[in-house]
Structure formats: C-alpha cells, structure tokens
C-alpha cells in the first residue's frame, strides 16, 4: 500500500520550542517510516507551510497512491484542501495533535478523523487503520488522475461514512476522536466523487427470495447462500458479546464481508447501505482509535434491528 503523508504549516517547528529530543518533525517521520515498514506500506512524506504546495504534491503523487494521511494544522478550515481531497477520490484520514477550535473543513473530505492522543499516536493509528485493509478492494486497471484528461476510471476502493463510529464518538466525548463524515451530495453532486454502485439484478432477485421467508407466499424459496443480511451481522455481533467470537475474529469476518459486498456480492434488499456502514465499523472496531465497546456493539445491534 502506497500512502502520502501531508504535514501542514508550522509542523516543521514541532518540538523545536521546548528543545526536547524525540518530539521533532524528523522524529515523527522516522517513527512513521518504521511503522510503515512493519505494515508493508510505502510512504511519501511532505511538509509545507503553503497550501498550494500541499495541493501540488497531491496532484503530482496521485496516480501512485492508495491513500492519504493529512495533518492540515492551521489549514483545517481550508476549502481548497477539502476540494483537492474530494477530487482525488482516495480514502483520506485527517490527524491532528489536538481537536481544532471549530469543526474541520478538511475533515469533511476524509473518511476518518483522529484528533488528540499522546505523542505521535494519531499518525500511527492512521497507519494502523490503513493496514487493517478496510479500504482495500480489487483495483481497477488504471487510476483517476487529478487535473488530467486521461480516460482512466476512478479508484475502486469505495469509501462510505462510518456513522456508527461518529455517533459513538460524540456519545463518549472522547478527546481521541475517531469518526467519519459523510460527503455533501450523491455521485452527481458537486463534492462527492465516489458513489455507491447499484445492486446487480441478481442481488435484487436473491434479496426478494430472502424477504419472502416466513411468509405464506414464500414456500420453497431460500436465500442465496452468500446473501449478506442484517440477521447475519446481528448474529456475529451477538457471538462477540457472548464470547464465542474474539474482537479480532469479528473484525476479520467483517472485513471479508465488506470487501465481498464492494465486489458486488448480494446484500439484503433495501439495507445495503446500512450493512456496508455496519461492516466498516466492525472492521475498524479492533483498532485502538476506533475500538467499539460492548455498549456501542449493543447500540449497533439495535440500529440493525430498527433498520
């Protein structure tokens, strides 16, 4: 996995004022490269005090990237950075050493925000999140180029908002916030660059079969063996809560199901979006920044029941 790390303004002064060793920008970059090597990731790391330099770097590196980690620092209110990330169409994670004074505009174009934590932890947790494979799907033959007129298709990793995590983070008031923000419009809208695929006809047929179970008119019909349903996800969460599944086993199962759905596997009719969001939350639930408590898992169960 190839990642671009963008450090915003004044991060070149990190740790300089207090004169402490082990907390400067070069120490951060060394820690990032060391952890990335352990995770099998290749990093391009750039720091600039100028908004345009960050955007130019994003455009120049885009075709070689699988994801972006950005600390906009004082530029967290930049609409230009937001638009650049949206145009890139790649999963991006915003990291900040402390929560901003107001809502981050740049974070609106990111699938996850990690704000606060000891030392370099926000950056390292972002690497761990990419390393979990939650954003990895089958790759197309070519990638979407920023500012170029090539006819290549957009990147196949389809990112959806993790609304369950957002709700949980607000509920707990955590300073180490991990939440996702949905983009403003559908695929044809002015800001969102990656939309959801329409379910194949075969998916809908299988879902209709599953929907008739337990009804008089559904005799002889059984759901497709690989059909993803709310009941199946609820059962896996219940197994986790009862101790029949470990946290890592649940995350691994959710990851495999999420990737299968992204490749067009059938899902319960009318609930595909809810299932995708739930699976993505569960995939990330084993990571420090996005771990779900038993209470939050019960909350997700309730949401699946009501959905």
Image: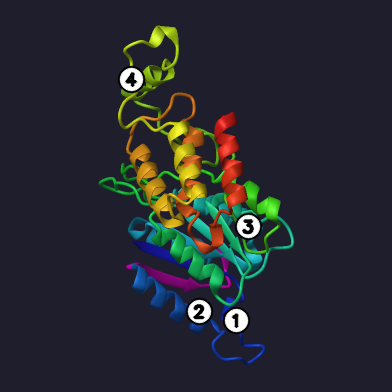
User: In terms of depth relative to the viewer, which is nearer, 289 or 201?
Assistant: 289
Residue that carries the numbered disc 1 in the rendered image:
14
User: In terms of depth relative to the viewer, which is nearer, 121 or 101?
Assistant: 121
> Is 85 on the left-hand or right-hand side of 200?
right
Residue 28: image tag: 2
Residue plotted at (57% across, 84% down): 23
Q: Mark 3 vs mark 1: which is more N-terminal?
A: 1
Residue that carries the numbered disc 3 in the rendered image:
78
Q: Are marks 1 and 4 in contact (CB under 8 Å)?
A: no
The answer to whether residue 254 is seen in the rendering is: yes
**Crowd around label 4: few <14 · some 14–19 · many ≥20 (10 Å):** some
Q: Nearer the viewer, mark 4 or mark 3?
A: 4
Which residue is at the far right?
101
Q: Secondary structure at mark 4?
A: loop
> Is 37 on the left-hand or right-hand side of 167?
left
| Residue segment shown in magenta | 40-51
Q: Secondary structure at mark 1?
A: loop
Q: Secondary structure at mark 3?
A: loop
Q: Nearer the viewer, mark 1 or mark 4?
A: 4
What's the CA distance linking mark 3 and mark 1?
21 Å
Residue 145 at what x, y percent from top left? 37, 50
């Amino acid at each position: 996995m190839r990642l671009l790390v963008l450090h915003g303004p004044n991060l070149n002064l990190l740790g300089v004022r207090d004169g402490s060793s082990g907390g400067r920008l070069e120490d951060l970059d060394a820690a990032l490269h060391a952890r990335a090597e352990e995770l099998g990731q290749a990093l391009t790391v750039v720091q600039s005090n100028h908004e345009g330099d960050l955007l130019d770097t994003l455009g120049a590196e885009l075709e070689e990237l699988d994801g972006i980690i950005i600390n906009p620092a004082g530029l967290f209110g930049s609409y230009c950075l937001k638009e650049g990330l949206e145009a890139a169409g790649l999963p991006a994670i915003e990291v900040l050493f402390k929560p901003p004074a107001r809502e981050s505009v740049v974070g609106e174009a990111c699938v996850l925000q990690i704000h606060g934590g000891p030392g370099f932890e926000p950056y390292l947790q972002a690497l761990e999140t990419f390393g979990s494979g939650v954003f990895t799907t089958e790759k197309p033959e070519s990638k979407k180029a920023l500012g170029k007129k090539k006819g290549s298709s957009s990147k196949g990793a389809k990112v959806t908002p993790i609304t369950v995590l957002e709700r949980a983070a607000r509920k707990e008031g955590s300073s180490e916030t991990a939440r996702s923000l949905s983009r403003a419009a559908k695929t044809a809208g002015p800001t969102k660059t990656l939309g959801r695929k329409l379910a194949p006809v075969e998916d809908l047929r299988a879902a209709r079969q599953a929907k008739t179970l337990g009804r008089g008119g559904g005799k002889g019909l059984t759901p497709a063996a690989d059909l993803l349903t709310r009941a199946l996800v609820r059962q896996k969460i219940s197994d986790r809560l009862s101790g029949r599944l470990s946290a890592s086993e649940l995350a691994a199962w959710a990851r495999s199901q999420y990737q299968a759905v992204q490749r067009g596997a059938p899902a319960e009719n009318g609930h595909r979006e809810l299932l995708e969001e739930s699976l993505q939350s569960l995939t990330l639930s084993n990571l420090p920044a996005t771990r779900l408590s038993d209470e939050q898992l019960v909350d997700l169960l309730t949401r699946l029941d009501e959905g």
